[in-house]
Image: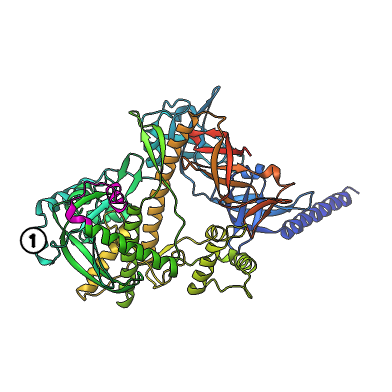
Amino acid sequence: MMVSQRMLDQNALSQLKSLKQELHDSTPRFQGRVRATSGRFGFVNTDDGQQFFLPPDEMEKVLPGDVIDFRVETTSEGKQQAAIEKLVSTELDGFFGRYVVRGKGHFIEPDHGGLNRWIFVPPAKRQGCEDGDLVFARMSQHPFPKGRAQANIEERIGAAQGGSIEHDYIQRKFNLSAEFADAVKNEVAQLTEQGLDELLPQREDFTHLPFVTIDSAGTRDLDDALYAEAHSQGWTLWVAIADPAAVIKPGSELDKVAAQRATSAYFPQQVLPMLPAELSEQLCSLVEGSERAALVVELRIDDSGAIENTHLYQGRIRNHAKLAYSQVAQLIAGEDTDISAELHGHLLHLHSCAKALANYRQQNCLVMEERPDYKLLFDEEGQIRDIVRLERSDAHRLVEECMLAANRAIADWLAQHEHGIYIGHTGIRTERLGEVTSLLKEHLQLEQKPELQQLQQYVQQLQAAANHDGELPLRTIVSRQLERSAFTTTDTPHFGLGFQRYTTATSPLRKYNDLMVHRLIDDLLHQRPVSLPTSDTLELVQQQQNNARTAAGQTEHWLKLRWLAAQPQDAVLDATILHMNASNFTVRLDDTGIEGTIDRRKQRKEWTFDTKTLSHYKDDQRFVLGQAVKVRIHQLDADKRQIQFALAN
């Protein structure tokens, strides 16, 4: 009897084991990468494009970017979600944040888009940090499987209210620096000692042309100069561009650091230059009264503003005057100016030429909507004391048109020589193309959906959208749904500007891609073999430029929010709606350019978000892009660089 009972028990255990194995085998299992959200939950994405929900308790066990093995379970509500079984790999190591002390607990509040929880710091790894300090830390204990992450303090960057903490912290976070290594400084010293005496006589002489630079009064890295001659039918426009490629050897230490930085970063009250000041502000800058090496672009422009032909020269020029935008704007307006009388005629020819170029773009290409500039006025402690709105002047437009013309003409010249570095823009994002074409067909009363992947029809329809006077701002709606531009060696259109092709070569002191274009032109002019950069090189340059712009933008936003926090918090402010989705509006304050969000999640039951028109509506009420609204500050945390507004009307 006992033997029989034992056999029954063993048989039951075997059946139970078999059942568990069957359940295990029938449960879907995958491997994927964790994607965090702004909330406590997340998602895990598989290589084949599937996405599964990670509930908050599971999300606590992992970090953004982790690769995990997981099973898929069905909740009592019938929804599928992921349950983590194994951590395969993790990539989040170092991170920045704010030191937080709560009682006896010491934590870091991460400054990381997907890390939305405090990380504990053990007593021995706190480096004497105090509440509110900004720090860099490294993860010392992964939260899997118990959800208990720990980190060690690697560096105390500074106190939250330090004099230059905004610059110091953001530059450290984005790995940016104003300093150059000794090897770079040694090369710069050699180039400075060598000078341009041997180089300049080898280049075509344009010193007789009265080139002038037009820029902000304090600008020292002058990389373009202008001159125009008027003819009976049009103009000859000369654009002289500083040519650092004439002195910087490819592969040198100087070249390597320029490639790594990729751009000059323009922070409030501080510039992190791509090239050392000895070059960018002196030896290669188009300094007033000095001879400099330049890439000289000669453009023949007809009365309509069309570019008839282009010639490129490796020349030497002399800047006859360093002019500020304000001076040239006064001259154009017919006001008194301190500009030398002998330059008045040349500058007015430049203005007439620029107006023709603008007219041509208006008729045949696409003109982006103008945005005001904002001047930040600082006190002695490096904090903003006021923000002044500045409207763009005719002098700004003059320079812009000449630069666009030169860059467009250089792109055409490169295409004719069958080698180029271009900036491509493919137009509307693929996933938004259907709704955009439907929108334009309906509101422009077209017989069929437009072919917006064809440049000519794209330009025609967006011009029609810009001139549409209906309730909806069609051109603005389309502009919020465009792809990003990208560097490429393929001759491809730039839909955003409406050009058949486009490049930039007019800022080689400030942008590495422009410097590469100068080297390419040098090879083509001398009929040498051409070596184009790889797609990986172009992508790295673009990433670093985006990185620098983001860093400068975050620093400015932080400083602006500190200033705003000191203003009356109940004031009603004029703003404009920039963007909308189902959950919020993004608005910009008209007087200061400060951007923030308006939370609309509580209005979802009464209001509807229309994905085609990017608008919110209820009955006969509607919020549209570009609409003027009145707002108040709802929540403001300057140190987190976060602001929420609430509608005041």
- Residue 442: name its quadrant: bottom right
Nearest the viewer among 350 and 63 is 350
Picture coordinates of residue 458, whole percent (x, y): 51, 70
Type of amino acid under label 1: Glu
Picture coordinates of residue 40, whole percent (x, y): 63, 42
SS type, badge 1: loop
Q: Is residue 530 above or below residue 184?
A: below
Q: Is residue 322 magenta?
A: no
Tally of marks: 1
* Span highlighted in magenta in the image: 325-344
Q: Residues within 10 Å of mark 1 (few under 14, many from 20)?
A: few
Colouring chosen for the image of the structure: rainbow
Q: Is residue 88 above or below residue 231?
A: above
Picture coordinates of residue 258, whole percent (x, y): 28, 54
Q: Is residue 152 above or below residue 489?
A: above
Is 611 left, or right, of 20 in this rendering?
A: left
Is 317 left, or right, of 234 in this rendering?
A: left
Give the residue displayed 52% in from the left and 28% down from the top: 568
Q: Which residue is mark 1?
A: 198
- Residue 154: name its quadrant: top left
Give the residue displayed 35% in from the left and 30% down from the top: 379
Q: Main secondary structure of the magenta part?
A: helix
